[in-house]
Image (cartoon, rainbow, N blue to C red):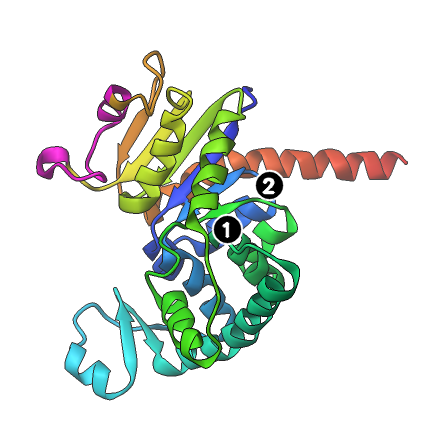
């Protein structure tokens, strides 16, 4: 019942091999306000719109797959041809972005780029199509750490000059936290996505509500393994908050959580709208 800005962060594997449809549902129905992920969490969404990913096996030999032009993500297989299609998708967009930079003075940030990619993909299966449609900002400070970075690298030789401003996005991300009366963090996994989200909330002396879901333990000092109490010590979660860490595999439990919470709200709103339409 508390109105607050929800920061939703997840690692790239959850788009590649787990929760893409659940994430898309939340974004499509405007159930989250700010998204944070790593580079793979952006590009794999678009690649899945362009070509299929295939079910394989964790034990398939890397050498054999390499010789066949197949890339393994867990037990999934992505053909090299998928990335060729992604290259064909990206190059005209990068050309247009560079032209707008030169002629209109557009300053491209990772979030602005992702907004543009979501517009250009024009596919309702995409998470970032709905982020574009619903004007939900997506922050990815590691935008070059993957296939998008490869495309930018190749493009820098074909048509040099494109500049990506990450400094503007750190201001944009932190301002999202500072401007909110209350904030909540839902973080699936760890690493960059978790730390970037928590660090933004440090700017407001901590998030009011926090849910971490991952399988990591804290003995190795990793960010993923850190319990919410560690985040409280840094001022990333408020001292009087009641945060939760769920030690579980996110692709198993998060759809159940969404079904019991956000989806229930969405379906109730749909029913209200249908009832009002019938009355009219």
Q: Is residue 225 magenta?
A: yes
Is residue 207 something one can see in this rendering?
yes
Q: Residue at x 40, y 35 (%)?
A: 186
Q: Could you say which is closer to the camera, residue 103 or residue 78?
A: 103
Q: Please, is residue 60 above or below residue 102 in the view?
A: below
User: Alpha carbon of mark 2 to alpha carbon of mark 1: how far?
Assistant: 17 Å
Q: Which residues are magenta?
A: 218-233
As drawn, the label of residue 30 is: 2
Q: Could you say which is closer to the camera, residue 36 or residue 227?
A: 36
For the residues carrying marks 2 and 1, which lies nearer the camera in this image? 1
Residue 101: horizontal and vertical position, in percent?
Answer: 58, 62
Q: Quadrant of residue 170?
A: top left
Is residue 53 something one can see in this rendering?
no
Q: Residue at x 22, y 42 (%)?
A: 215
Q: Crowdedness of circle 2 by 10 Å Cα count: few (<14), some, many (20+)?
A: some
Q: Crowdedness of circle 1 by 10 Å Cα count: few (<14), some, many (20+)?
A: many
Looking at the image, residue 105 sits to the left or right of residue 46; the answer is right
Q: Please, is residue 135 above or below residue 95 in the view?
A: above
Residue 36: horizontal and vertical position, in percent?
Answer: 42, 45
Residue 70: horizontal and vertical position, in percent?
Answer: 29, 80
Q: Quadrant of residue 15?
A: bottom left
The residue to which callout 1 is attached is: 111
Q: Residue at x 44, y 28 (%)?
A: 184
Q: Is residue 146 magenta?
A: no
């Amino acid at each position: 019942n508390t109105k607050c800005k929800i920061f939703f962060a997840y690692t790239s594997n959850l788009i590649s091999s787990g929760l893409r449809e659940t994430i898309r549902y939340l974004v499509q129905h405007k159930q989250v306000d700010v998204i944070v992920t790593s580079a793979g969490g952006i590009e794999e969404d678009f690649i899945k719109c362009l070509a299929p990913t295939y079910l394989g096996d964790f034990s398939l030999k890397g050498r054999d797959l390499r010789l066949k032009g197949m890339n393994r993500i867990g037990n999934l297989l992505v053909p090299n041809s998928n990335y060729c299609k992604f290259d064909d998708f990206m190059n005209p967009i990068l050309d247009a972005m560079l032209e707008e930079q030169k002629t209109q003075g557009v300053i491209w940030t990772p979030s602005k780029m992702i907004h543009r990619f979501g517009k250009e993909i024009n596919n309702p299966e995409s998470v970032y199509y709905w982020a574009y449609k619903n004007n939900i900002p997506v922050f990815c400070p590691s935008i070059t750490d993957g296939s998008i970075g490869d495309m930018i690298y190749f493009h820098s030789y074909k048509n040099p000059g494109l500049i990506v401003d990450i400094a503007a996005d750190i201001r944009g991300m932190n301002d999202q936290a500072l401007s909110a009366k209350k904030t909540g963090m839902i973080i699936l996994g760890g690493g960059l996505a978790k730390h970037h989200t928590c660090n933004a909330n440090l700017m407001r002396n901590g998030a009011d509500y926090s849910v971490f879901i991952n399988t990591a333990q804290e003995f190795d000092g990793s960010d993923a393994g850190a319990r919410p109490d560690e985040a409280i010590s840094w001022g990333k979660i408020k001292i009087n908050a009641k945060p939760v860490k769920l030690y579980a595999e996110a692709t198993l439990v998060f759809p159940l959580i969404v079904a019991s919470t956000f989806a229930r709200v969405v379906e109730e709103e749909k029913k209200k709208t249908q009832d009002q339409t019938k009355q009219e």
